[in-house]
Image: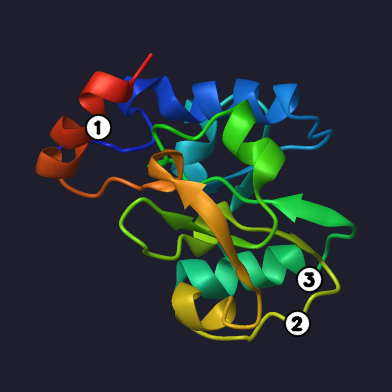
Amino acid sequence: MGEDKSLLNSNVERLYRELEASGCNRIIIMCGSENRANLFSGECCIDTKDTLAESLFELISTLQGTLQLAPCDAYLADVELFSKIQGVPLDDKGKRQPLLARFECEDELIQSQKISEMFQNIPSCEGGIKARNTNTPEEFKEIQSFLR
């Protein structure tokens, strides 16, 4: 993207507010390395494993109840989307977005180095354009007209 996706459009802060508004009572930000923790307000968790999937699996194994994930590059995710997710949402292009999943901690996640494999057992649900993630400047340009 040419810049830190988590800071682009102040998206982590925006997602934090949207998650709070949707009823989330504990929000944990996976910030990567220790030197990034000061970039975000709120509870931060340092990635402790080699891959995001392994770090996420480790964190999830310490939690209970219903989890709602929200990646920093979900620039259109909002309270409306979070209120309807039940599983792994499909974006408007039909792609599963496991980092926006809502699931019970007791659900069977697969320990893997790949996020896509980790969430194989979680069913898909509708998400639409609000579930789209953005990984390139071109993709970001595509969604800019939808940003508030």
**Residue type, mark 1 in image:** Ile
**Mark drawn on residue 143:** 1
The image quadrant of residue 124 is: bottom right
**Residue drawn at (54%, 86%), measured in percent from left and top?**
112
Horizontally, residue 54 falls left or right of residue 97, namely right
Q: Earlier in the sequence, mark 2 or mark 1?
A: 2
The residue carrying mark 2 is 108
For the residues bearing labels 2 and 3, Cβ distance under 8 angstroms: no
Residue 69 position (above or below residue 146) = below
- Asked whether residue 48 is in view, the answer is yes
For the residues bearing labels 2 and 1, Cβ distance under 8 angstroms: no
Mark 3 or 1, which is nearer the eye? 1
Local crowd size for mark 1, using a 10 Å CA cut-off: few (<14), some (14–19), many (≥20): some
- Viewer-closest of 118 and 6: 118
**Image quadrant where one finds the N terminus:** top left
Mark 2 or 1, which is nearer the eye? 1
Mark 2 or 3, which is nearer the eye? 2
Image spot of residue 113 (x, y percent):
47, 82
Looking at the rendered structure, the secondary structure element under dot 2 is loop
- Viewer-closest of 83 and 98: 83
Q: Earlier in the sequence, mark 3 or mark 1?
A: 3
| Mark 2–mark 1 distance (CA, rounded to whole Å) | 33 Å
Image spot of residue 20 (x, y percent):
73, 25
Image spot of residue 64 (x, y percent):
89, 60
For the residues bearing labels 3 and 1, Cβ distance under 8 angstroms: no
**Residue type, mark 2 in image:** Glu
**Residue drawn at (37%, 64%), measured in percent from left and top?**
95
The residue carrying mark 3 is 61
**Residue type, mark 3 in image:** Ser
Q: Residue furthest right?
A: 65
Residue 29 position (above or below residue 12) = below
**Residue drawn at (12%, 39%), measured in percent from left and top?**
137
